Image: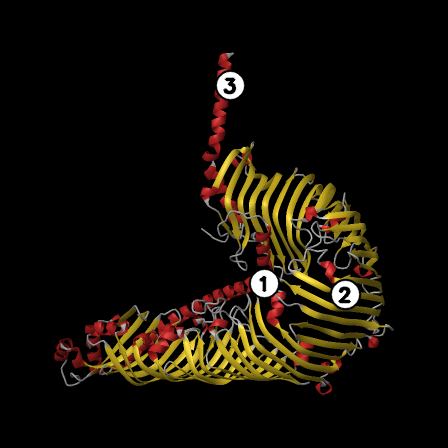
Amino acid sequence: MKKTLLIILGIFIFLLVSLFALPFVFKGKILERIEREIASSVNAQVYYDINNVSLSIFKRFPHISATVEQFGIVGNEPFRGDTLVHMDKLQVDFNLKSVLFGDIPTLTGIHLDGGSLFVKVLEDGTANYDITYPSEEDTVVESNFQVAVDLIQVKDFDLIYDDRSLQYFMALGNINLEGSGDFTADVYDLPIKMEALIADIAYEGTDYLTNKQFKGETTMNIDMANMKFAFGEGEFALNDFLFDMKGFIAMPAEDIEIALSFGGKDNTFKSILSLVPGIYTDSFADLKTSGTMDFQGFVKGIYNETSFPAFDVSLNVADGMFQYPDLPRPVSNVNIEMQVKNETDNLDNTIVNIPTFNLDFGSNPISGRFFLANLKSYDMDGVLQGKLNLEEMTSIFPIEGMELKGLLDVNAQAKGRYDSAAKIIPNLDIKMLLSNGYIKSTDYPAPIDKLNINASVINTSGNMNDFLVDLSQFGFELEDEAINGRMKINDFTLLNWDGALNGTVDLGKILTIFPMEGMKMEGKIQADIQTKGSYKDVEEGRYDKLNTRGNVGVSSFAFSSADIPQGIKINQAKADFSPDRITLSQFDSQVGQSPLQATGFLSNYMNYFLKEGETLKGQLSLNSSKFNVNEWMTESTTADTAALTVIELPKNIDFSMSVAAVEVVYDNLSLKDVKGNMSLREGILRFSDASMRTLGGQMTLNGSYDPTDLSEPKFDFNLNLANLSIPQAFQSFNTIKAFAPIAEHLTGNFNSTLAFSGKLGQDMMPILSSLDGKGLLKIAEAALKDSPIIQGITSLTKLNDTNTIQFKNLSIPIDINNGVLDVKPFDVKLWDYQANIQGSTGFDGTIKYLINMQVPAGKFGTQANTLLAAISGNEVSESTIIPVAVSLGGTYNAPKVGLAGGNSIENLLATALKSRVSNETAIIQQEVTEQFKAAEDSLKRELKLKADILQDSVKKEADKKIEETKTKAADEAKKVLRGLLKPKPAKPDTTRLD
């Protein structure tokens, strides 16, 4: 017996050791299999650290578990750099036998602990989750995973779904989910539990749910063959609002079949209050409440492009009351009956019925009812009545730091139908009166006082032409400064108006009383405006029938915000209004650090403000003593270090502007005495006769800046440059550094006429590979010193040992095509020798030049004398001109200098002297030039290919940057999730690829 026990114990120990060792023995094989499957099936960048991968057979024996930490997927184009998913810790379980001995590894479990998923769908339907290779690709190996998952666990996960094709947005945080079942079966039950924070759910720009806690537990019956998902007994909750849901959703084909019923469960009035924004706070548990609530409904039918399911949703609240624990007055007598139903498959037949709606704010009752027969003719019947003593509001709601007074009286009735074709609207009798309003903030010593509003909307006949909106009184006072206004609008078809605004408002005081985060504002606005007219006249351009007159003045105005950190100051401004234009008679301002004065006028302003698609026209005269363009072209307030960014120009503005500035700072240039004309039309800025002093000379500019395609902004300029400093131009212009690097070692001035065009990068710098241009460069006198090209030529030819060349009266024709500067042949004197130079410089710095020099044979010293002595006759002598062809390649700072054709000096002299005897010199020179042109053409073809690739890359980067500006909703959601959720340990950058 003892021996048997020892044998059994030995076998057990052996098996235990084997189980420990098995993951390590087969780790390489398993990881190799996983990587092979990823490479064959995933069209994305998958990142993980092999050291963060572990295997265990004990976590879910008899399954083997692979765990990876800090794992994620980053998309390829057009989502390059976007993290689709990041997982703090992912565990997947496989059937051990299938991994080691089977042809198909079987996945049996998924466990996710921490991470995030960002799903993005573009307007054209392209989705970032579509990362599998197309099945028709011949090079793709079919994936061999078999799914037999029986357990899914998710903890502390975030999800953002941004579908721009549907204008749908959802952000969920802290998702915890667990489900288990036989996933291999066609029909199976899936018990599932889930909880999450609903940060935002929005559709077509409307937020439907924000900052709500969701919990749910149910058993789903899943029929994969018929794509039917049924919900059994379960419980769901939004905040403290409990409900159940039963039924199914099926998608057997294109249609979606829905049969769901739902209803409140063990709810009180406090449950529904938990869904009201601003009430569900940390102190919600202490809120005193009473009353009952009932909620129920169903959705049943087919959903497709032509059909909508029938539905019926009802809510009833009886004898509701709530009171904050530290405040003396409650909201009581809350009674609500509401039903929204549609018994057909046409959404237009929806009925909304609220027969009962009443509540008391302290001693102030509010009551009403509303009925809407359909969504076609909008037959309605509604009433809303109530009076509010605003002073009581602060004893009902926790309004900190604010004292309110005044009486608000609302009496509204609407009955009838809306039919725009028949020019019928409901009968309306709506009156609102706010008297003796008073708002006092603890942040400012004086109140907004004498706040009075008297408004009414009347239509007794139902005809559109009897429609009347009468704001007969609007006004308030703040420290002896008053603002008063009135506006009357009649005839719903013509929209005739008659209004006025008069008074002064101190914006700084208003912002102190009603602060806005990240915004600073001060200054006064004085207004005296009377306006009378008809929108019909605006539409048909009968401006002579409009009567808008008066003026608006601004003084000591200052504004800054997160979007405009540079700030804007208006010392004094005055605008006079007339029916056809706004005349700006005075405008003294400082935009950022730049003083700016302006005069002029705006026209078509009524159309622009009242009608979509209209253009605001104007003529302005702008003057500045020093204008810094850089601080308005960067995303940072530090203009010296921040990169410039593309400026988008509005397409609905048509301005003509004359500009005069003592100095303009743009990039690293200081432009003096700037004068000229600009026009902004259809989103394109054009310059004409713009002149300025810079770089020691004068510049005249005509051209345009076109950012209509933000990913590929374009420019087209004609320049006339006079007496500009060559060294300063080299330091200031990247294009000169790229195409004329020789300017680094040149002294002197130059003149030029140049027409060039191209594309700008997102940093507003020219994309060199896109440039095209043509012009003439003139240099009266210059010196080239310490150039590596001089050193290369002197070292090769031994013709001169100086490091300086003087130039006079150079005229160099140039062409730029696809980022290649093509220098046409021009004559120049190199030291004492006549020469002709031609060639090209690429945008990448490569050079290819041919220098044909005419050198007397005697200048070559003893080498030439020996050859001369060997040649009989008088055809050659020391004065015989030897053509020396020098080729330049490589880059300017690392030139490759050689004799054309690969000759040595000795061979060159021998061949040249003999060719003189046989009169073949011209033929030899022609052959050298033809060989050079062939090599240069080959280089240009290579540069063209490189330019196309580079421009395509720049375009993709630009598209990505523009796309990033469209993901603000997702970025904001991420911020909200970070703010609402409990702090987590810092994680590495999920887009990093090791």
Query: Which picture quadrant has residue 62?
Result: top right
The tag earlier along the polypeptide, 2 or 3, is 3
Dot 2 surroundings within 10 Å: few (below 14), some, or many (20 or more)?
some
Dot 1 surroundings within 10 Å: few (below 14), some, or many (20 or more)?
few
Can you identify the residue that label 1 sits on?
Answer: 517
Identify which residue is drawn at 46% across, 43% down.
Answer: 50
The image shows residue 637 at horizontal and vertical percentages of: 48, 67
The image shows residue 75 at horizontal and vertical percentages of: 53, 55
The tag earlier along the polypeptide, 1 or 2, is 2
Identify which residue is drawn at 67% across, 81% down.
Answer: 528
Q: What residue type is labelled 3?
A: Ile
Kind of element beneath mark 1: loop
**In 3D space, how far apart are the residues under numbered discs 1 and 2 (Cα atoms)?**
29 Å
**Side (left or right) of 674 relative to 874:** right
Question: Mark 2 or 3, which is nearer the eye?
Answer: 2
Can you identify the residue that label 2 sits on?
Answer: 408
**In 3D space, how far apart are the residues under numbered discs 2 and 3 (Cα atoms)?**
90 Å
Can you identify the residue that label 3 sits on?
Answer: 8
Circles 2 and 3 in contact, beta carbons < 8 Å: no
Total numbered badges shown on the rendered structure: 3
**In 3D space, how far apart are the residues under numbered discs 3 and 1 (Cα atoms)?**
75 Å
Q: What residue type is labelled 1?
A: Glu
Q: Which amino acid does label 2 sit on?
A: Leu
